[in-house]
Amino acid sequence: MRITNRAWAELALLSLIWGASFLTIALALRATGPFTAVFWRACLGAGALWAAALAMRLGVPRDLRFWGACAVMGLLNNVVPFTLMAWGQTSIESGLTAILNATTAVFGVLTAAAFLRDERLTAPRAAGVALGLAGVAAIVGPEALGAFDIRSLGQLAVLGGALSYALASVWGRARLGGRPPVVAAAGMTSAATLMMAPLMLLVEGPPRLDLGAAAWGAILYYALIGTALAYLLYYRILAMAGAANLMLVTLMIPPTAIVLGRVVLDERLAPSAYLGFALIALGLIAIDGRAAAALRRARRPAPRAAPPTRGRPDRP
């Protein structure tokens, strides 16, 4: 599917929104725990999404199978990745979190090939997966095997969140494909809220309300803009440009997160992080396949011109 200028603009906007989410999560984690941060993200995001669904006159489904599918989707797409990444971000930089989050597409290829019959692991995709995993290895580094510290655990937590996102994409395609995207997103964030509430109370206690303007601003941003509005924009671009073009946002998010982390939080990433991102980016390009297809077309010899016919040419 061809990507239009409007789709490019909205894709860039989505990458900015999600790239800034890593910064706002880091700011919120200065005032609250990761479980509380995720609870507010799911709760406020669900409220905004239901408001959008009702404004579109979509209504609230009463099918128990839908809510069962939303419970699994909320666990895989919200509770597990949000919590793991928020916890991981307490020990690693926001830019590095965004880079490791880009492996979601790499894991997505593996999970789709494992669980979906129409998604084969072709040679280009396998090469892309290998490049992506090489990028992860470059980021984590061989020293993590000998000295396993809290930073290594933080990186593994973010990778675990990326894997959970990939599993969620398979589940959503299998069980929620027939529902309006806004309703499905509202349902899964509602289910995630119900799961996060007891976890938050058990681990961190009741949520504090005296967090300060900066913390509340960060929470409102990643809940309302980085979650609710981003989901609406995500599905809009999906319908406009297709899934293959939408995957480009995975490459566009880390630069935004890295720049914001450097400017606002004074984060400095090691050279291995940039090398790892380059390898992951090459892997995603290989998985996408369009660059290789364009190269093959460029190398293909041009068709020979037909020899001129003798005699009088046809009249126009």
Image: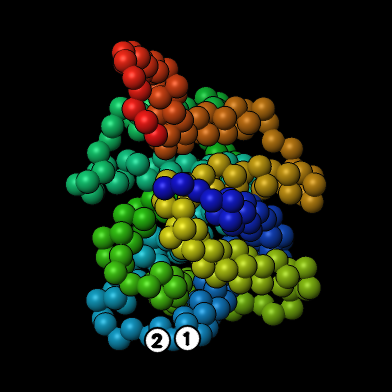
Instruction: Check whether the beta carbons of the residues at disc 2 and disc 1 lie within 8 A of each other.
Output: yes
Of residues 123 and 56, which is closer to you in this image? Answer: 56
Q: Position of residue 283 (x, y in %)?
A: 46, 32
Type of amino acid at the residue the image marks with label 1: Leu
Question: Image check: 268 left or right of 205?
Answer: right
* Disc 1 secondary structure class: helix
Could you tell which of marks 2 and 1 lies nearer the N-terminus?
A: 1
Mark 1 nearby-residue class (10 Å; few <14, some 14–19, many ≥20)? few
Give me the residue at 31% from left, 13% from top: 310
Q: How is the image coloured?
A: rainbow
Q: Kindly tell me whether residue 108 is visible in this rendering.
A: yes
Residue 59's disc number? 2
Q: Kindly tell me whether residue 140 is visible in this rendering.
A: no
| Image: 68 above or below 314 | below
Q: Position of residue 40 (x, y in %)?
A: 58, 73
Mark 2 nearby-residue class (10 Å; few <14, some 14–19, many ≥20)? few
Residue 54's disc number? 1
Residue 205's disc number? none
* Disc 2 secondary structure class: loop
Between marks 2 and 1, how big is the CA–CA gap?
6 Å
Question: Image check: 261 left or right of 35?
Answer: right
Q: Position of residue 229 (x, y in %)?
A: 57, 68
How many numbered discs?
2
| Image: 172 above or below 134 | below
The C terminus lies in quadrant: top left
Of residues 89 and 303, which is closer to you in this image? Answer: 303
Q: Position of residue 132 (x, y in %)?
A: 46, 32
Give me the residue at 32% from left, 41% from top: 110
Of residues 121 and 233, which is closer to you in this image? Answer: 233
Question: Image check: 22 left or right of 301?
Answer: right
| Image: 59 above or below 124 | below
Give me the residue at 31% from left, 45% from top: 111
